[in-house]
Image (tube, rainbow, N blue to C red):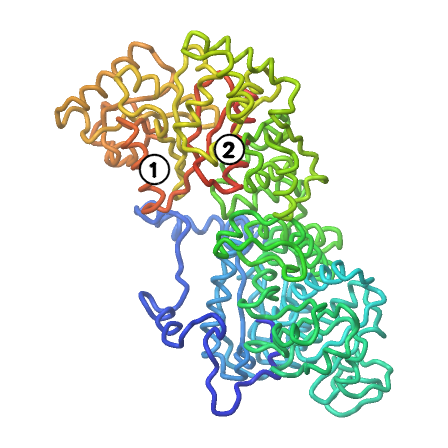
Amino acid sequence: MTNDKTTQKPQSGQKPQAGKGTSLTEQEALDFHSRGRPGKLEITPTKPMATQRDLSLAYSPGVAVPVKAIAEDPAKAYDYTSKGNMVAVISNGTAILGLGNLGALASKPVMEGKSVLFKRFADVDSIDLEVDTTDVEEFINSVRYLGPSFGGINLEDIKAPECFVIESRLRELMNIPVFHDDQHGTAIIAAAGMINALHLTGRDLKSTKMVCNGAGAAGIACIELVKAMGFASENVTLCDTKGVVWQGRTEGMNQWKSAHAVKTDKRTLAEAMEGADIFFGVSAKGALTEDMVRSMADNPIIFAMANPDPEITPEEVAAIRSDAIVATGRSDYPNQVNNVLGFPYIFRGALDVRATTINDAMKVAAANALAELARTDVPDDVAAAYQGNRPRFGPNYIIPVPFDPRLLSTIPVAVAKAAMDSGVAGKPIEDLDAYARSLAARRDPIASTMTGIYDRIRRHTKRVIFAEGEEPQIIRAAVSFTSQGLGKAILLGREDRIRETAEQAGIDLGKIGIEITNARLSKRTSEYADYLYEKLQRKGYLFRDCQRMINNDRNHFAACMVAMGDADGMVTGVTRNYATSIEDVRRVIDVKPGHRMIGVSLALCRGRTVFIADTAVHEQPTAEELADIAVEAANVARRMGYVPRVAMLAYSTFGHMSGARSEKIQEAVRILEKRHVDFEFDGEMSADVALNGKLMESYPFTRLTGPANVLVMPDYHAASIAADMLQELGGATLIGPLLTGLDKAVQIVPLSAKDSDIANMAAFAAYAATN
């Protein structure tokens, strides 16, 4: 994705390989693109089209209303159409990947792929347009009039130097962002890696010497961007197939090369490389030789970005010298310069502020944001995407990886701010923190659900103890909890072990301000033992038993901290099963008077949130217990901002089939009736009736005014099975089980939970402590 497309061509007699280095065969690639519906895109409506009324609103006569509104005020197009979230990916196929000029039609698989990446990574809608002309003026005229349809234009796979003319002219003619990704995408990602490489090698940007080999689209853009960032022009040497681009040279020159010609007596790439600090290669395989690498300065920085084969491989560099930092354009090597780290998020930020262009300030902001992200601790989600390998900032990790979920809430914010600061934003964003949270919610339903919870606990911060503080995912969760401003995190464990684990994981605890508590060294140990003995002395426990539990078991110690007011909430469960954790906590913390302890899971599926109870505590609840579970679950839904509609589920609906279990549920409904609860409820009913408003119409006597959002299951087994099936087959995202009903705020996570899940559960504990 990072080659100079004017120089990369397949060698004579060879076919380009599909994904060389990624173990893909040509047949696999063909099968992928042909199976099912051919291609990679389809159009999906965003409004209902189920009734005649829907059609009347979507088209005639209803559509006339927004037409008139837009005619009166063109800015209304952003309110009533998809323009504000739509990007056109446009090519003429004159420089497809490293394959050369294969024509507009042959470029369509690439353009479709680009459109898919826009949607997958930044929730930007996109459509590909292949323009069948190599004439620059014809191409410009084909694109310039598309402004009313799109919020931005992404140019792709257009050869140099025509691409420079096309982009420049279209930027002048159109009032929406026009961005040639082959140029600027490569430059931005490479610049981000360069920033971190300079940081690691202790270099100053203004005195560093760079050689860029490749004077096509990507090469010119790279040196223009590094100069915009502060590189001195005399310290940047551009080379092409003829050698150094020097002042006075006439052979193979054009206005774009001439703009970067330097005054020098060096004429070859080999001469230019002597003493160079940085090599940027956007050229061809083998362009950088071993002798050239040997001649570079100490701690050289080598970005060999030609695809599919770099100018020199990391193995070849390592065989020559051990002090080099190397990046390539390939996914099978560390430090991949991958354009997908840039264009989706850059357009996301530009679209959201309705930018009229993407300028240098926005590009530099994107590069700096990427560089900063690579220096932060990597979450479990990223490690999971790479088979458990957790990258750490250093010579082999200077660029974030594409599946880092934080990219969406980081890069667009930086781009949007730069657009506003540089005066090209048509619709400024006032609250960038809120914008970042909304971005996270676009692709992550959990983030959307957690937004309101986070807002509340930031206003009322609490102290949450992480009982298993020596575990690496617990440490990362505590760092995340604290750095997001959600409260004060306390890690329970041996301080030397916690700091050693953090150091091995690349986590800097010193900057975060996390508190560490060791049960054996605590001054409160004897008081906790007294407290626990008072609770357990009539339940078969001796004082020494309570001392042992406080000294040796972190769950008991952490629960006592919460019970005695030294912490507001607690999270545990990573190292022991759920039932054991509940037993530990229950020895210390009582159920809240008038409540029942239950587990409630949240299922987030296709825009709906459903609470499922009880998924953790009661294996075979009685009718009385089912009624209590309904009350607790309804309270959880209400605290999270939902109006509870509770369905008591069974395999039958309103007595359709008899049986002891149905009778138990019917009795639970009668109990709720007698209690005069303040929420809607009904049952027994099957899950399809409870969730489907159309099916519910067959029972006009039901108390529910709409589909249920709280499902009370007949037993723990049904609840657990239903939640797991929703996740695996229905594509639902699950949160929980959330433990509720205790007198203090405690949450228990599943064994081996990810750091993001643990941080969320800590937030729920803090949230419960605010109520």
Closer to the camera, 710 or 317? Answer: 317
**Label 1 crowding class (10 Å Cα cut-off): few <14, some 14-19, many 20+?**
many
- Three-letter code for the amino acid on which mark 2 is drawn: Met
Q: Distance between the Cα atoms at labels 1 and 2? A: 18 Å
Closer to the camera, 394 or 121? Answer: 394
Closer to the camera, 203 or 342? Answer: 203
Q: Quadrant of the image for the N terminus?
A: bottom right
Q: Which mark is residue 647?
A: none
- Location of residue 443 in the rendering, given as x and y in whole percent from the top left corner: 50, 48
- Location of residue 378 in the rendering, given as x and y in whole percent from the top left corner: 59, 49
Examine the rendered structure and indicate whether residue 314 appears above or below residue 101: above
Describe the element under mark 1 as helix, strand or loop.
Answer: helix
Mark 1–mark 2 CB contact (< 8 Å): no
Examine the rendered structure and indicate whether residue 3 appears above or below residue 739: below
Of all residues, the one furthest to the front in this rendering is 544
Q: Which mark is residue 723?
A: 1
Residue drawn at x 45%, y 76% is 18
Describe the element under mark 2 as helix, strand or loop.
Answer: helix
Displayed quadrant of residue 643: top left
- Three-letter code for the amino acid on which mark 1 is drawn: Ala
- Location of residue 750 in the rendering, given as x and y in whole percent from the top left corner: 43, 36
Closer to the camera, 331 or 85? Answer: 331
Q: Is residue 366 left or right of residue 47?
A: right
Examine the rendered structure and indicate whether residue 407 appears above or below residue 20: above
Residue drawn at x 79%, y 91% is 250
Residue on which disc 2 sits: 761
Residue drawn at x 87%, y 82% is 263
Which is nearer the N-term, disc 1 or disc 2?
1
Displayed quadrant of residue 667: top left
- Location of residue 189 in the rendering, given as x and y in whole percent from the top left corner: 65, 64
